Image: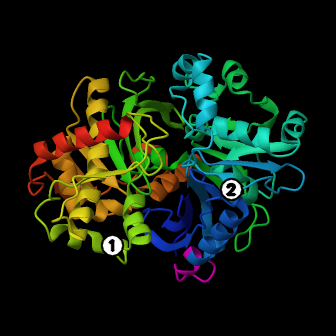
Amino acid sequence: MSDFILALDQGTTGTTVLALDAATFEVKGRKTVEVPQHFPAAGQVEHDAEEIWAGVLVAIEGALASTGVADAGSRVRAIGITNQRETTVLWDRRTGRPVHRAIVWQDRRTAPMCQKLRDQGVEPLVFDKAGLLLDPYFSGTKLRWLLDNVTDAQVRADRGELAFGTIDTWLVHKLSGGAAHVTDVTNASRTLLMDLRTLEWDDALLAAVGIPREVLPKIAGSAEVVAHTRGVAGLPDGIAIAGIAGDQQAALFGQGCFEKGDVKCTYGTGAFILMNCGAAPVPSRHRLLTTVAWKIPGETAYALEGSSFIAGAAVQWLRDGLGIIKSASEIEALARSVSDSGECVFVPALTGLGAPHWAPDARGLIDGIGRNTTRAHLARATLEGIALSIGDLVDAMGKDAGAPVASMKVDGGASANDLLMDVQAALVRAKVVRPRVVETTALGAGMLAALGAGLVADRSSLPKLPVERTFDGATAGDVEGLRGRWRKAIERVLR
């Protein structure tokens, strides 16, 4: 009978837990639980960390139950965690209770703080040491906001009474019964506070953002035992928590992008493209990010990353905001009912623009609407807007790498949309390769846990994902005309 690896994928809109066969990495059980969203003000997005934890427990129970194995919990050999990366939690070390809702990566409330730091000349330091730009996207300024705005938070943090973490840190804390306060290098590399070369919290960065060292977790590798379960419903004590990576890095690992130049793009709430750039960080000359891809025994890898904050969320907006579709799955058929978007262009800057523009105050734009514009044209323009955003990132990535991207592996929910993938292939002028298993984020976390727990000898022992389909852009239509309309629309958004 199979032993299992539990892969916890805690995302922006839902938590998915996979029970993976510990020998083959096949999915034997699965459960997804929705994450409630909180929007206290315009531009602000929050999660309740306790609600996230409650959902994780439900998802663990459901995934184990769906294996059909009566004692599945007792057969778990290791746990891997992957998470929405920059989302920031601050909690009381004694009680274990958050002092405020978690501030989500999409939240833009710290835009004025970022501008103030830029005006003070801090951004070159951040770019040189952390590989990042000053944007409200990252955790450091979110933590600074909490210290400024929660009563007595600064004083209590200085005394070591409060603990900061991204969602991985929070989940390890809860899984270990409060015993561990730890993050991994991939998540730490998204805080503005870690030096990419030393892989340690950096005093100059901490001083620049105003963060006390006493509040920070220990930084560990992505594949090592960081804690053991204690007091978790449905699981015995003592299971190794042995793999941690931010969601995009976990997907890069799960896709098997182990060679320098390998590229993947994940289409979730947002869309994120990463290129493995090898054993040394590569500074971007075109406003991309440099980040840690993973740290496993014997290897540290770095990546270039481009971030588009809105992808699947644009489809959700068509459904929930405009009522154009009743379910996200309807959009492809509706978009295919017209041959093009009829001069309509949608820039999906619903929460600002990420790379390469970095305009947190930008807002979405639908341009080119005429009397003949229908809901089908808007649906197609939405898919094209997602693909065009990624096209800008791929162009910048090719310039940074010194060679165009030849092939891009894809995953995430929206990668199941064939029309989107074909338009994407045309816009990036590269093959788009979709595996049979698109839950590569959770799979990557499971693979890292297997490495960390010693269930496999090294990454060469890990399975390769079979390809389901390759797209070449044959049905995309007038791509150059689309690019021209997009450039004009972006100019209008950035004015």
- Name the foreground residue: 310 vs 83: 310
Magenta residues, dominant SS class:
loop
Say whether residue 471 is left or right of residue 310: left
- At mark 2, the secondary structure is helix
Which of discs 1 and 2 lies nearer the camera? The answer is 1
Where does residue 485 sit, x and y in percent of width and height?
19, 44
Residue type indicated by callout 1: Ile
Instruction: Give the label on residue 324, or none.
Output: 1
Q: Residue at x 52, y 18 (%)?
A: 128
Q: Quadrant of residue 135?
A: top right
Q: Which residues are magenta?
A: 63-71
Q: Relative to residue 324, is residue 226 depicted above or below?
A: above
The amino acid type of the residue labelled 2 equals Leu
Left-right relation of 90 to 225: right
Q: Position of residue 411 (x, y in %)?
A: 35, 56
- On residue 171, the disc is 2
Residue 122 makes an appearance in the image: no
Camera-side residue of 30 and 72 = 30
**Residue 288 position (above or below residue 167):** above
Crowdedness of circle 2 by 10 Å Cα count: few (<14), some, many (20+)? many
